[in-house]
């Protein structure tokens, strides 16, 4: 397993257990305030949190479309055993 996952695991455990302590609240309020503070450009009001929620959508739609397109464009003849296995695994993506 890549070391990045171990680092994320350790950070996650610090966040999970640190939430119970005053020190964590003292550090995290600035970050939370930064994410939820309303900003205005012209007449448009937004938060950083709402902008960060929008970015994963096009990626996920493109990723799902790619998988569905690959498996839907298969050979229209008799299905082989390996193709049936791939199709069964792909059912979770579509």
Image (tube, helix red, strand yellow):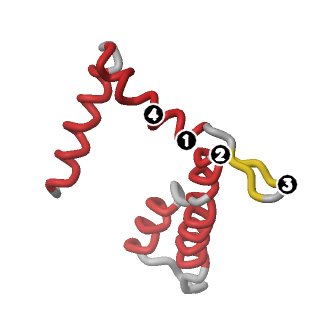
Query: Does 72 appear above or below 34?
Result: below
- Give the label on residue 79, or none: none
Task: Indicate the quadrant containing the C terminus: top left, top right, bottom left or bottom right.
Answer: bottom right
Instruction: Name the secondary structure under disc 3.
Output: loop
* Contact check, label 2 and label 4, Cβ < 8 Å: no
Instruction: Name the secondary structure under disc 1.
Output: helix
Q: Residues within 10 Å of mark 2 (few under 14, many from 20)?
A: some
Q: In the image as oriented, which residue stretches furthest toward the right?
A: 43
Q: Residue at x 59, y 48 (%)?
A: 48
The residue beneath circle 2 is 47
Instruction: Answer with the quarter of the image where residue 2 lies.
Output: bottom left
Instruction: Answer with the quarter of the image where residue 44 lies.
Output: bottom right
The residue beneath circle 4 is 30
Q: Residue at x 59, y 82 (%)?
A: 73
The mark that comes first in sequence, 1 or 2, is 1
The mark that comes first in sequence, 1 or 4, is 4
């Amino acid at each position: 397993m890549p070391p990045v996952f171990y680092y994320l695991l350790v950070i996650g455990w610090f966040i999970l257990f640190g939430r119970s302590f005053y020190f964590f609240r003292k550090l995290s309020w600035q970050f939370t305030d930064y994410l939820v503070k309303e900003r205005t450009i012209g007449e448009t009001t937004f938060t950083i949190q709402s902008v960060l929620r929008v970015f994963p959508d096009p990626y996920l739609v493109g990723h799902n479309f790619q998988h569905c397109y690959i498996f839907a464009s298969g050979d229209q003849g008799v299905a082989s055993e390996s193709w049936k296995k791939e199709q069964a695994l792909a059912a979770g993506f579509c």
